[in-house]
Amino acid sequence: MTTTVAVFTRDLRVRDNPMLAAAARGADQVVPLFVRDGKVAAFSARRTRFLDESLSDVDASLRHLGGRLVLREGDPVEEVCRVAGEVGADRVHIAGDVSAYARTREERLRSGLTCEFVVHDDVHTVVPPGLLTPSGKDHFAVFSAYHRQWDAHGWRQAVPTPRRIEVPKVKGRKAPSVRGEGGESAARRRMTSWLRTNAESYTDNHDMVAVDGTSRLSPYLHLGCLSALELARRGDKAPDFVRQLAWRDFHHQVLNARPDAAHEDYRPRGDRWRDDDHAFDAWRAGETGIPIVDAGMRQLLAEGWMHNRARLVVASFLTKTLYLDWRAGAAHFYAHLIDGDIANNSLNWQWVAGTGTDTRPNRVLNPMRQAERFDPRDDYVRRYVPELSGVDDARRPWTLSTKARNGYPLPIVDLAEGRARFLAARG
Ligand SMILES: Cc1cc2nc3c(=O)[nH]c(=O)nc-3n(C[C@H](O)[C@H](O)[C@H](O)COP(=O)(O)OP(=O)(O)OC[C@H]3O[C@@H](n4cnc5c(N)ncnc54)[C@H](O)[C@@H]3O)c2cc1C
């Protein structure tokens, strides 16, 4: 009798899940286990709900296969070791991951488990982090070079869904029973309709902030409700869209080689960031007086998601125009984004701040020009900044009378002065 434990982390799916497929292969009994770590910082209610919905959906899928999800709470390493001991497991399977938290968990499991321990590096990304390297280096620091290899490299085949999962007698809480936007079933519906209807117009629409021109699959990809590999394979008619999945892999392979880049400058530029609580609070609340910046920040608070172009604009505004530390911005994003992901969040923030992999680290996005190009009719601004919904020139509210501005604030910074201050500081 062979018994295995399949430890789910952020790979909450049964389809194309190499970790689950390997745990089920040749095993008589499998414990599909998820451990809630009470010590992980509390997330926003919206994000917690998305996780619950995803757990609920995995549980339903496993029940379909004859099993269920076993839910425990506590220290993940202690609980995994305890469950492995209780069922007399021969092997424990888990997906490899790139954050410092995941690596520590993996090391502790390796020394704590008395049975065989298998780590699968091909679960979260299309191409495993660390597989592609430039000669003599441990990771790619330039996206275009990475992308060329990523595209040319053969990808693994999708793995089959286990036919049957038989769970031994083991204690565990019942998985939450909530349905909503989260989970593999919802992810697959969204993927199918996206690929059928919108993916081909991605190239034209993906930068237009008021248009629903991107997939909005990021929360599902973050929690692994969807296989990035399956999405990349099925998106072959939309190469610009698939390229974004290469960006995702790119950031994962940087963090894999440099886990400290979650919090430390990847390329220190000698910055002496300003300290300005007033400006930071205005940025967070969407009250800076720069309409496209405020629209983005208010979208984040309202939806737990923000359009990528708006993320670029608000991050450039914080780190360059206001010259405030990217870490503060990244922490605010991480607390509110449902797709909040250490690799994508920290490394995109560093990219914008010029401390990361951008080959033009000192470029400053002009929010007025960005608005002209990517929100030409001010639809995005009007949607998220209701004070300006009825005015003619929503892009330049400072030209309006106090009454017409409707309580909307004047700009907290002169854009040209902010830019000059940043460029002087960077030398
Ligand atoms: C400052 C900043 C912070 C960010 N923080 C996060 C984060 O915490 N989590 C996150 O998933 N993305 C983050 N991104 C990347 C990007 O904004 C989102 O992935 C994207 O907006 C999600 O929307 P979508 O699913 O509709 O994307 P689509 O345009 O449909 O792209 C498909 C998928 O590709 C990936 N992707 C797209 N753009 C990027 C990118 N620039 N870098 C890495 N992967 C990308 C995502 O997984 C996305 O779901 C951040 C970008 C910036 C500029």
Image (cartoon, rainbow, N blue to C red):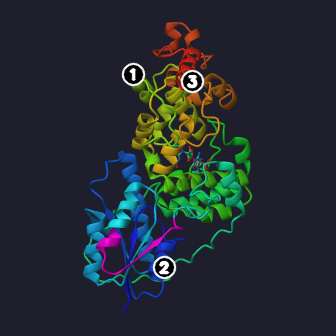
Q: CA distance from mark 3 to mark 1?
A: 21 Å
- Which residue is at the far top? 401
Q: Is residue 126 left or right of residue 18?
A: right
Q: Nearer the viewer, residue 152 or 282?
A: 152
| Residue beneath disc 2 | 22
Magenta segment range?
A: 109-123
| Circle 1 crowding by C-alpha within 10 Å: few under 14, some 14–19, many from 20 | few
Amino acid residing under circle 1: Asp
Q: Earlier in the sequence, mark 2 or mark 3?
A: 2
Residue 10 x, y percent position in the rendering: 44, 61
Q: Earlier in the sequence, mark 2 or mark 1?
A: 2
Quarter of the image containing the N terminus?
Answer: bottom left
Up the image or down, 361 lies above or below 224; here it is: above
Q: Is residue 422 left or right of residue 87?
A: right
**Mark closer to the observer (3, 1):** 3
Specify the label residue 276 is tagged with.
1
- Which residue is at the far front? 136
Specify the label residue 427 is tagged with.
3
